[in-house]
Amino acid sequence: MITLLDGGMGQELIARAGRATSLWSIQALLDDPAMVRAVHDAYFAAGADVATTNSYAVLPTRLASHGMADRLQELSVLACEVAVAARDANGAGIVAGSMGPLGFSFQPDLAPPSDRAAEAYAELARIHADFVDVHLLETMSSIDEARGGLMGCAVTGKPVWLALSVDDRDGTKLRSGEPLVDVLPLLAEFSPAAVLINCSLPEAVTAGLPSLRGAGVPIGAYANGFTGISDTFDHIGATVDVLSARTDLGPDRYADFAQTWVDGGATLIGGCCEVGPAHIQTLAKRFK
């Protein structure tokens, strides 16, 4: 049975708002929470089983860099409440509490050591725990980055989905360069409820999934629709304006990639950046 995740939140918000800012998807929580709700509603209407909270960027590092460190709990709660309201209006579904990388996405060398990262993730997990069904660690790009997230989330006892980002040129490696199979001992140690590959080219996801078949837990995938990650997209303040969307990844083409993931054993399928409601609707028609 397939659990259908939602698609990308941040890029969908940018498409609707018409601009990108260095606060990423936090900007919508500040300016227009109703738009966040509308995106959740659109994914449920498309057939998604999951609402991923708009909290990927609600992190102490990003908020502190914008002079908003004191708003961590407020914005985390708001993101969770909006997702829960959408799920309740839908009448069913899973709320997944998103936690992105500390430091910067795709840059595991900028992440704090796992013991320090665990403290930050534990704080976030405790806030999310009153609202979410599962913690979702997203775009973890090294073994140590994943370890910090798993250590932190362990404090609540809730299920954890670990989503790993792989090298777009070689999906058998994490973005750190470490072999993806090296995560298997970490999975045995922390027993997450699922392990996924996310925010990588669909071709890289296809290459990487076989490395997770020995995980002993459900596996999944949700790729992005970028042409790749620019070298300049490497610091807080950088926006997705420096990234380009593919023009060859419409809903049917994306569903073809997803078919290979399902054929390879994946049971959690969805989309990341540049994968929107139309893609999820096509996935729902094909797999549900």
Image: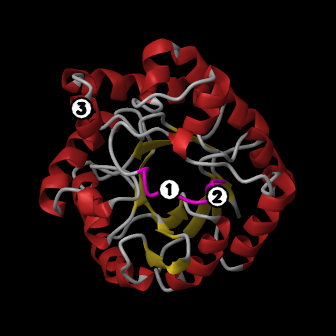
Q: Quadrant of the N terminus?
A: bottom right
Q: Main secondary structure of the magenta part?
A: loop
Element marked by disc 1: loop
Q: Residue at x 38, y 78 (%)?
A: 177
Disc 1 target residue? 230
Residue 164: x and y in percent read: 45, 65
Query: What is the three-letter code of the residue carrying label 3?
Result: Ser
Per the model, the C-alpha gap separating discs 1 and 3 is 22 Å
Using the image, tell me which numbered label, if any, was put on residue 65. 3
Where does the magenta region start and end? Answer: 224-233
Per the model, the C-alpha gap separating discs 3 and 2 is 28 Å
Query: What is the three-letter code of the residue carrying label 2?
Result: Thr
| Lateral position of residue 126 relative to residue 269, left or right | left
Out of 165 and 120, give the one closest to the viewer.
Answer: 165
Residue 111: x and y in percent read: 24, 56
Around disc 3, counting alpha carbons within 10 Å, would you say few (fewer than 14), some (14 to 19), or many (20 or more)?
A: few
Res 98 → quadrant: top left
